[in-house]
Image (cartoon, rainbow, N blue to C red):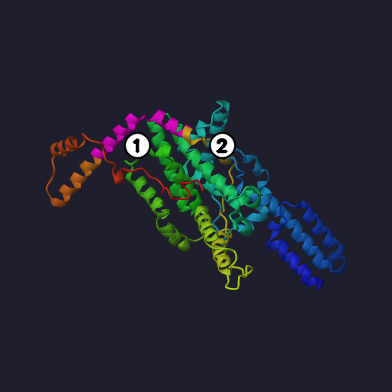
Amino acid sequence: MIISVGNFIKRWLSEHFQDFRGNEMLIDRMTAMCKQNFLVNEKSLGEKILSTLEEQRQVAFLLPLLGGYCGSFYSYDIYRNWAMAKALLRPRLLAPNSPPPSFPSPLTLMTLTLSRLLANSASTNKAFIGSDDLCCSVFRARVLTFISTRQIHPKECLDQCWSKKDKYTRAPNVMGLIDLFNHCASWVSSTIIGQSKLEDRVREIKRFMRVAIELRRLNNFNGCQEILAGLSDSSIYRLRASWLKVERDDKLMQEFDEVKKALSPDKSWVTYRAILKEIQPPCIPYLGVYLTDLTFIEDGNSNYLQTTDSRTDIINFEKCRKQALVIGNILLYQQDSYNFERVDVIFDMFFKGLKFIEDKDALHKMSRTIEPSEMVEEAKRKAAKKAERDAAKKKSDAAGTPVSPSQTLKKSSSTSGGTPRSSSSSASPSLSSGSPAAKRF
């Protein structure tokens, strides 16, 4: 009997330590019980239970260090025990055939170090934020993927606990990803709006588009949606003069459109769900889709079934089954981890240099300052004329009769007197208004 109880406790500690996490009194009582009972009657079993308990306590402390995001972009000091976390946990989480980690070249590291020294001496971090060589899309994408690593417990996905008053206690990992999502989206918008020159804004928009493309290559769909949410913010969407210059890069726009199509919310994310079934881990799925599914299941199904004899104690196991399918998909992609190594120079500069404005009204006011309404209307008129010229050229190519430039210009001038129409081909990237990402969860 005592062996069966001991094996049950051992399995409880190894597979469901979330029940003990943060409750030192319960851990102490479990430790005392094992010493008083199992060490006396079954010494070998008692030692295994105590060893499992101590190991799980270390895992509970070190696991957040693999992600490191603590609700603020300035919490980079949590990496102080990174070596211990990597040695203990990374072998468990890595896929069996994970490729060896890659590092920046020595020249890049030397340049980063010099740039950090110059930035510190000048009390500014523009050296990191404003250079393609120092803040390339790969570095940004890998850092975002690194800090997005979370081990969500099944209990955090029940009863919509991420929307309750005590959400940070009941669903700490879910709330950590939600906060990271919102902060990252605000960082994207703030970085672009913070550039007073048109050329600088165009450069930053292109950088974030490349980051989204790299995140898609890494199968970090949650990170992709963070970037898309920032680029689709109303303060960025209205920057027509900036977007017109961005749209001249056909190759970049084509790759970015593929990312948007893959994460389109149309038909309940049908394209994204199909892609998710085919990809190979590691992967960070978009959490908003799972939370939306769980919300519909919770709101559309009661916990107990109604019976003809007025019984109220019949559990609705069909609802439980649907919830288990969604939670199972969340846990499925937590089994493998990315084999990334932390580079101190990159991480320190990334976290120290990131600032964002969460006030949407302030962002929109700044957006109207750097690109007034008159400038936006002029950009719209140019976009309409360009669309008409492209349509006329396409029509002439199809008919086999060339259209002279004078005819095109004449047609454009005759049609540009009224209110310009928005062309679907020149519209800036945006998310659907019904998308969880657009609503910031």
Total marks placed? 2
Q: What stretch is highlighted in magenta?
A: 362-385
Q: What residue type is labelled 1?
A: Arg
What percent of the width, then of the height, locates residue 295? Answer: 53, 56
Report the side of 296 relative to 4 (left or right): left
Task: Say which residue appears at 50% left-offset and 51% top-offset.
Answer: 222
Residue found at the far left of this picture: 401
Q: Is residue 101 magenta?
A: no
Could you tell which of marks 1 and 2 lies nearer the N-terminus? 1
Image x and y of residue 380, in percent: 29, 36
Does any portion of residue 423 appear in the rendered image?
Answer: yes
Q: Which residue is drawn at 37% across and 45% down?
A: 252
Amino acid under disc 2: Met
Residue 105 in view of the camera = no
Circle 1 SS class: helix
Residue 380 drawn in magenta = yes
**Is residue 56 positioned above or below 353 on the image?**
below
Which residue is the site of mark 2? Answer: 349
In the picture, residue 118 is in which quadrant?
top right
Q: Nearer the viewer, residue 237 or 334?
A: 237
Within the image, what quadrant is residue 402 found in? top left
Height in image: 332 above or below 61?
A: below
Residue identified by numbered label 1: 240
Q: Nearer the viewer, mark 1 or mark 2?
A: 1
Main structural element of the magenta stretch: helix, strand or loop? Answer: helix
Residue 50 percent coordinates (x, y) = 79, 60
**Residue neighbourhood size for the residue with mark 1, other residues' Cα within 10 Å, grouped as few (<14), some (14–19), many (≥20):** many
Residue at the image position 44 percent from the left and 60 percent from the top: 275
From the viewer's perspective, is 22 left or right of 123?
right
Mark 2 is surrounded, within 10 Å at the Cα level, by few (under 14), some (14 to 19) or many (20 or more) other residues, namely many
Look at 34% across and 36% down and name the residue there: 240
